[in-house]
Each structure stands twice: as C-alpha cells, then as structure tokens.
Image (cartoon, rainbow, N blue to C red):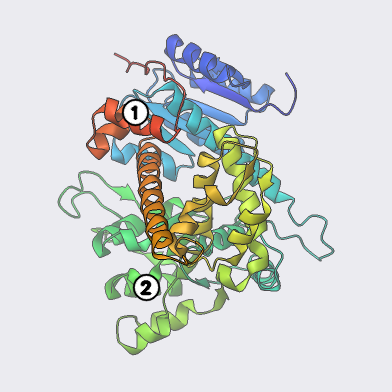
Amino acid sequence: MPDNIPRILVVDDEPGICQSCVKILSKEGRNVEYAFNGYDALKMMKEKAFDLVITDLKMSSMGGMEVLRRVKESYPDSQIVVITGYATVSSAVEVMKMGAYDYLPKPFTPEELRNVVRRALADLEIRLQNRAMKAAAAKPATVHHQLIGDSPKMHAVVKMIGKVAPTDSTVLICGESGTGKELIARAIHANSRRKGGVFFAVDCGTLSGNLLESELFGYEKGAFTGAFKSKDGIFKIAEGGTVFLDEISNISPEVQSRLLRFLETREFLPLGATVKQKVDVRLVFATNRDLMEMVKDGSFRQDFYYRIFVYPIFTPPLRDRKGDILPIAYHFLRQFGELTGKRIKGFSTGASARLTSYDWPGNVRQLKNVIERAVILCEGDEITPKELPALEDMGGFVVKIPESNEELKRVKKEIREKAVRDVEKNFVIQALMQSDWNVTRAARNVGLQRPNFQNLMKKHGISLPARPAPFKKKG
C-alpha cells in the first residue's frame, strides 16, 4: 500500500472482533493489522509505525491500560482508541487522562467505529501538520500551534506564546468564549520543555467546588462518602506536564485559596491525607470574564488574582480580525470534508461574502459549528449561501420590499414556508448529529416513530448509508 495510507493496529484477544474491525476499516482503504494480545502488539510496533492503535480494555494477556501506557510512553504520536464491553464512567475518565484519544463502549456499530477512526486520524493529521506550521518563517525560533490567521493581532498572540512557552511562568489567557483559549494553552505546552509530558484541560465551570478540589488534588480512601479507595489527582498525574484550568472565574474562594498556596509552594494535600505532596506542574489559566471587576465586588480573591496575572495573553474576538475568517473557514472545511468523505473545493463568492460580513458573536467555535453544518448540507463541490441557514436565521431573511398588498401577502407566505422548511430540516439534522447518525436512536430521542422520522429525512433530501449489525459484547 502507499506510504501515505494511515496504519491501524487492532488489539483484542477475541479473533472475531479483530477480523471484523479489519474488514470494516479495510473497506475505507485503511491499512489494518491486528494482534491478539498486548505483547504481540508492542513487538509489531517496534518493527513498524502505526498511526492509530485500537485496543480492548480487558484482555487475558496484558490489559488495555498497560498497552495504552506503553504506547503513549514509547510512541507519543500514535493515537489510541480504547474499546470495551465493560464501560464505566471511571474507566472512561481514566483512559482519557492517560492519553487515549477516545473511548468506544461495546456494542458499537461499524459506523461508530468508522467515525471514531476518522476523527482520530484527522486529529493526528492536523497535529502533525501544525508542527511545521512556522518552519519557513524567518524567526529565531519556530512556534508550533494550531492558531489559524495572518492578522496582526494573531501574530502578536503567537509572538507572546513564543516568549513565554520556554519559561515556567504562570499564564492567564483572557478572551471571549470561543476565541481559542485552549488552543493557546496547548501551543504554550507544545513549545515548552514540558512538551513530552501530559496536557490536562479542566473546565472549572462544569465541576462544583468539592468535586474540582478532589479532581485536582486527589483524595485518600475514606476522605468522603464514596471514596472507597485512594485516587491521585490531576496535579499528581500531570507531573512534568501542563494543567490548563479554563473558566477560572467559576471556582470557589476555598479552591482559590488552595490554588494560591499550590502556586507559592508547588505542594498540596490530597483530601483526607496528612502528608503533603510536591509536584512539578505548570499551570495555565483562562477566563472570559473581567477578573478585576470580580475582585472589586468580592467574588474573586485579590491575592489570587495578582498571583495568576503574571503573563496575560488577550485573545482577540473574530470580529476584530475579519481577515482570518476565511482561512479558519477553509481549515474547518478540510477537516469536516475528511470526516464526511466529501470533496468540497471551497466557498462560492456569495458564501465567502456572507461569512466575512458576519460579526460571529460566538467566535471561532460558532464558525466551526456553522461550517460543520454547511458541509453536511452541501450536495455539490462548493458551499453556497443556501448551505448557511444558521447565518440567515440569525440575520433574518433578505427579501425585496413589496410594492403592493398582494405582493406583501405572497412574500409573507414564502417567508413562513421557508422558515418551516428550514426549522424542519435543521431539526432532523440536529437529531441525527446528536445520535451519531443512528436513525432509530435519533427518532426515539425526539419522540417520533422511525417511519415518521424517515419521512422527514426523505422530504428534505437527507440520506445516510445502511448500517450493518452491531458487534456483540464478549461473554
């Protein structure tokens, strides 16, 4: 096979699973091999490189956790997807913390397998391409990042990343939601001496004070109800790496106090423990709020604010760098084109004008969602304004002003009919996207009978290939 075809290794002690994965993925032109245990898999990886490893979690000879640990240690560029018939929330969290790209519980359908493989390989391709992103630039040092744009404001951000990354200084990234604060944090990590270590991203807005504290610092057995065994926290697991704490404005004053002490001493006390632990971890913070205003109203500690406000990086909103909109849009077009298997060459003149004229209050995240949706809707080789209904919905219908009462009635009827069509089509697409394009599940989730849901799909020209039967769980 050609050298540019990704190599995939399937590791499972059940031959049927291996053979099924090989059959399914080979049909998409993938170069797939398999091993029945972790020892054979590692021997194969010594002889040749694999872009993606798909490993079962529970195996009689060397479990998936050990395979994951050894692969990430020796082959950090290889993506890893863990599959298992024994899915639990704790095991899913654990494998993701150890560096797995994704987690796929059994039973899963062939389409679910294909989708996760596409995403993993697309993510790998982007990551490898971005390593050489600034290689040709005439600068003392190259800054590797996934930040797209050639505007002066983005050049300033990249320059700041290049200056602070080699240091161990604490960084505070400030900016609106969706501006790419996590990408900046990852760029800092990727260009630091810690790039070989782990990078943990923690959304402080989704965890309560006690839960966030136990996740960061860990706990001892019996520290609280449900703590049946001791658990290392993120700071311990991330030894030698970087921890990114997003939406830092949401943490409680108590956790702020503990983080302040940690920043001063690099020591922490797990919940229920009596002996302090010391780790070498770099912290990068982010916020979409004005922390100084929070300090003034008493909701954010002043001493903690000044401790993290060492090297602030301000991310510009997309409306302030209009020249970056199309490069970012083309980036997402390529990404989602690969995921969907569509060959879309670009945007029409009208679509480009629509994209660049909009202010994007949701910034890059909103643009990404709109492009993903447009790729799904697109049936040709070019995205046109009709594939951008999200923008139309936000900006209203553009129609010629009627010149008579009869014309006004006709326009009002057309607007109502178009609005209903768009809402119906978006309703079906959203249900399918949220159900991984499983028609039965999508119909059930929205409260429709499958035949009625399929009728809506036919009405709006939405189709998808038939799905083979799902894999069976072992035992």
Instruction: Read off the residue under disc 1.
Output: 454
281 or 465, nearer to the observer: 465
Residue 39 at x, y = what percent?
Answer: 53, 20
As drawn, is 87 to the left or to the right of 385?
Answer: left
Q: Residue furthest left?
A: 225
Instruction: Read off the residue under disc 2.
Output: 249
The answer to whether any part of residue 192 appears in the image is no
Residue 172 at x, y = what percent?
Answer: 51, 73
| Residue shown at the point (57%, 74%) measured from the top left | 313
* Numbered disc in front, either 2 or 1: 1
Please identify the quadrant where the N terminus is shown. top right
Which residue type carries mark 1? Gln
Q: Is 465 drawn above or below residue 428 in the view shown?
A: above
Q: Is 69 drawn above or below residue 275 in the view shown?
A: above
For marks 2 and 1 on the same chain, the one whose residue lies earlier in the sequence: 2
| Residue shown at the point (82%, 61%) measured from the top left | 137
The quarter of the picture where residue 305 lies is: bottom left
460 or 38, nearer to the observer: 460
| Residue shown at the point (37%, 29%) measured from the top left | 438
Number of marks present in the image shown: 2
Q: How far apart are marks 2 and 1 (CA)?
A: 45 Å
Q: Is 338 drawn above or below residue 59 in the view shown?
A: below
Residue 148 at x, y = what percent?
Answer: 65, 58
Q: What element carries label 2?
A: helix
Q: Residue furthest bottom?
A: 296
Label ID, residue 57: none
386 or 80, nearer to the observer: 386
| Residue shown at the point (85%, 64%) measured from the top left | 138
110 or 77, nearer to the observer: 110
Q: What element carries label 1?
A: helix
